[in-house]
Amino acid sequence: MKIPPAWRLPPAIQNRFGERSVGKQRAMVVDGHLLLILHKAPDAGEQTRVGVLFWRQPNGIWEHSGGGIGLQPLLKHLENYNTAEEKLQIAYRQAESAEDYFHLLEAIAPLRLSAKNMHATLQVAREGVPDDRDLIDLRDWAYEIDRSLDLLYENTKNALDYQIAQRAEEQNRLTTEALVAGHRLNILAAVFLPLTAIAALFGMNLNSGIDASSTFTFWLVSVGAIALGSLVRRWVVTGRWL
């Protein structure tokens, strides 16, 4: 990023300014000249930061690298951050699922970092030009944006953690219910397994003679099978026969 050719900055500032990229946000103060290198409010997923320059001359006149004279372009720059933060607040209130909160965190993170660095840059500018009261207001506004984004990030992260914990709790509940249902089926199988086995055995087409027995024999065998099933059930439940 290049300094506008019409700007007459001290060599000490020009020599510290790179040609290839905008670099990090920072403030340079030399001989009453203040140069602010700031980043535009980044969008979610945006990897490259777009830089803008604001030059305050010793007489207090501001100039903007995008054109324009006065403090209004710098105020507009902070207003863009404030607008982006308000949109994220709306998205937070509308979020419902863990996926919504996750995507919201991805959108908050770059804006939060950029706002934090902008606030630090304006703090350095405030210390470098202590007589400019406009810088106090700008720094305080940047702090409010930074603080709001910090709170929004923490609230979103807490909401995401709650959603994940709630989902894990629901999964544990379903797993427990499945285990209980399986255990009940095992108990039923243990009770009726001997009866089923005996019924299958005597249901074979063999000349065992039991088909000629009295009804008492049938009930005796049935009760014995159920009693044996009760013993098997006890073993399934307690691990002991008696």
Image (cartoon, rainbow, N blue to C red):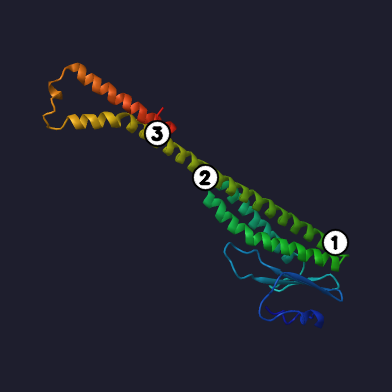
Residue that appears at 61% across and 53% down: 88
First of labels 3, 1 by sequence position:
1
Viewer-nearest residue: 29 or 63: 29
Three-letter amino acid code at disc 1? Arg
Q: Nearer the viewer, residue 153 or 84?
A: 153
Residue receiving disc 2? 168
Q: Which residue is under mark 3?
A: 236
32 relative position to 209: left or right: right
Labelled pair 2, 3 in contact (Cβ < 8 Å): no
Q: Residue at x 79, y 79 (%)?
A: 13
* Residue 216: % across, % down: 21, 16
Query: How far separated are the C-alphas under marks 2 and 3?
Result: 30 Å
Residue wearing tag 1: 133
Quarter occupied by residue 222: top left
Residue 60 at x, y percent in the picture? 84, 70
Say which amino acid is labelled 2. Answer: Ala
Q: Are marks 2 and 1 in contact (CB under 8 Å)?
A: no
Task: Please identify, in this view, whether the residue under mark 2 or under mark 3 is nearer the observer.
Answer: 3
SS of the residue under disc 1: helix
Mark closer to the observer (2, 1)? 2
Mark 2 burial class by Cα count in 10 Å: few <14, some 14-19, many 20+: few
Q: Position of residue 51 (x, y in %)?
A: 67, 71
Q: Is residue 195 visible?
A: yes
Please report whichever mark, 2 or 3, sits nearer to the chain's N-terminal start: 2
Quadrant location, the C terminus = top left
Discs 3/1, front: 3
